[in-house]
Amino acid sequence: MNAIASRIADFLKVHLPFSNLTFDELTQIATNIRVINLEKDQSLFQINDKLHDSFYVVASGVINLSIVSDAEETLLNKCVEGEIFGLRPFFAKNNYMMTAKAREESIIYAIPIETFKPFVAQNTEVLNFLLESFASTNYSSNDSNGKLISDTVIFSNSKSETQYFQSLTYNKFPLTTAITSIIKETAQLMTENNSDFVLVTDKNYPIGIVTDSDMRSKIATARFPMTLTIDKIMSSPVIAVTENVSLAEAQLLLLQYSVSHLCVTVDGTDKSEVKGIITEHDLIIAQASNPGVLIKEIKRSQEPKDLRKVRLKLAELIQTSLDKNIPLSHVMNVAGEINTAILKRAVEIATIELGSAPARFAWFSIGSQGRKEQLLLTDQDSFLIFEDVAEANYRDVKDYFIKLSKKIVSILEQVGYAPCSYGYNASNMFWCKSLTDWIKQYDTWMNTPGENSDNISGIFFDYELVIGESKIEEAISNLVMKNTQKNGLFFDYLGNDALRKPAPLSFFKKFNLEDEGIYKDKFDLKNRAIMPLVDAARLFTLSNHIKGINNTYLRFKQLAISNPANSEVFLACAEAFLVLNKIRTVEGLKNDNDGQYITIENLSKVDKEKLKNALNPMKELEDLIKDSFQLTQFS
């Protein structure tokens, strides 16, 4: 036995998914493994690199997985000893979507895909591990061995991979024939129907399948005479699935059984009636389609009701994604892009109705929409900035934009987004004004916070340009960055504001429930759990002069890079934010509400534990805020 291969097999056997294989199997794999030595800061692959023929295991050292957007590097995860990454070649044909770079000197094992495929096909545990891993941000066994990091994270400019977990469209009227059919007649039937397969059935139960490949390899070579019945050359049994099988599941089933067709049946077995057939071509078509289809529908929309239909489809997509256990960061990203497209189209429709704008302007979404975190049909928050105009024209120009904003808010209300209960909408004259007025507004908020009744609202620092002049956004962003320099008073205000949220747990680690009102005995998931994370992420992002990242999850990820000393706290907060929002989204969809108030008793034991664990980083985060900022004046 090769001594090196033996040592590698010894290493692999204690890590998932390799612990599901025998030592002999691991040795076979190990003999084909390449050992790669990476220097500090050396990349194994980068964004848009062509896919490698291998996936990777960290033998020693640390590998950072990251993306670069607008010159900012965002850390997605760190892979340490025993962790697997670079699984993309198993599932996708397009290039890498992230960079894998050594944080320190590292040794990597490269496992050829072709070498590993047979073990995927033969071992259900390995198969499931790969499938689950592709569908989740990370996977850990109970003893923390074998954490697997997904490299399928998507961002706004990337092709959505939520598609891999959506149910497939399939042929509901497949060509069928009886088991008593003659081969020659079946061949003629396939030719007449221009079909490359025929499903063999008995009382509409699937018995077998015959493909063009069977005809070529068994009939054209004269191995079987054409006068025999079709059962002599059919492949049997068929591989049956339910109609909600996902693209990723279908891909792995084709790989596992080395087939090119899956039979859709009533209960997913060959003991029930046929509902259709999924072919390799269907998988190719499915990979070419994604939530971009909804974006196209949005662009074609002419009325609010058209946009409402798309928003309802988005709700279905979110529900399906959660059912398929797709990482919430993916779901949030896709939903954010679709929500923004709806907002943009609403502005366009309103502008068409009202007539051309008298000046250039920019429409901004703020709050959860501005952070691209809106998964449920919660309210709309917005503001509008128009370019500076001559004083004589100011009133008329502002009147136009107030009317325009009211139309936009009305359209979005018809779509399902209620106006903000606090009045944070561009239809409010306070939040629809010229660039100079907005510069004065931000200057006042940031340089003299708390001095007047118009107190700052943090959500105005979570803005996203929906449509309009990018130079207007740039002017505001530059002003905000300038005003964060040596501005202790501003961060004193924001820091204290972040700490004012009601505590989620009591001294005895019990959930603090509402003690009066219509939500009595319910837990305020938004204000007690989610908003403290949102506020803290905003606070630290601004104080670290990080520009262009609004999403709370990505803010914490970026903060982990910018502040290595506190990276563990920030990464824990990033994960907690996803857990809390998933619970809120699931509860909101189930109860057809915004998911803010939940009944703890209705949660499963597992979800209660997840919720409590997600609250654990809160104390460390609170201490970090107190240590990082001199919170005195507004305490």
Image: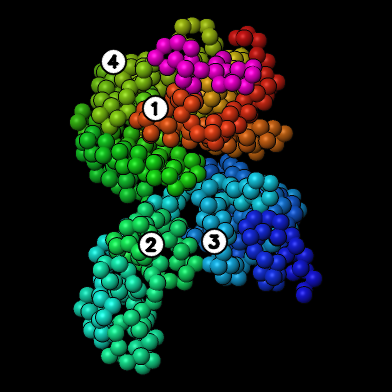
- Nearest-to-viewer mark from 2 and 4: 2
Q: Position of residue 398 (x, y in %)?
A: 30, 19
In the rendered image, which quarter is residue 289 located in? bottom left
- Name the residue carrying label 4: 395
- Name the residue carrying label 1: 594
- Nearest-to-viewer mark from 3 and 1: 3
What secondary structure predominates along the stretch shown in magenta? loop
Looking at the picture, which amino acid does disc 1 mark? Asp
- Nearest-to-viewer mark from 1 and 4: 1
The residue carrying pointer 3 sits among few (fewer than 14), some (14 to 19) or many (20 or more) residues within 10 Å by Cα, namely few
Q: Residue at x 33, y 45 (%)?
A: 295
| Residue lying farthest to the right in this orientation | 3
Range shown magenta = 500-527
Q: Earlier in the sequence, mark 2 or mark 3?
A: 3
- Disc ID at residue 269: 2
Is 511 situated left or right of 107 in this image? left
Q: Earlier in the sequence, mark 3 or mark 1?
A: 3
- Name the residue carrying label 3: 124
Query: Distance of mark 1 from mark 2, alpha carbons?
Result: 39 Å
Looking at the picture, which amino acid does disc 3 mark? Thr
In the rendered image, which quarter is residue 331 located in? top left
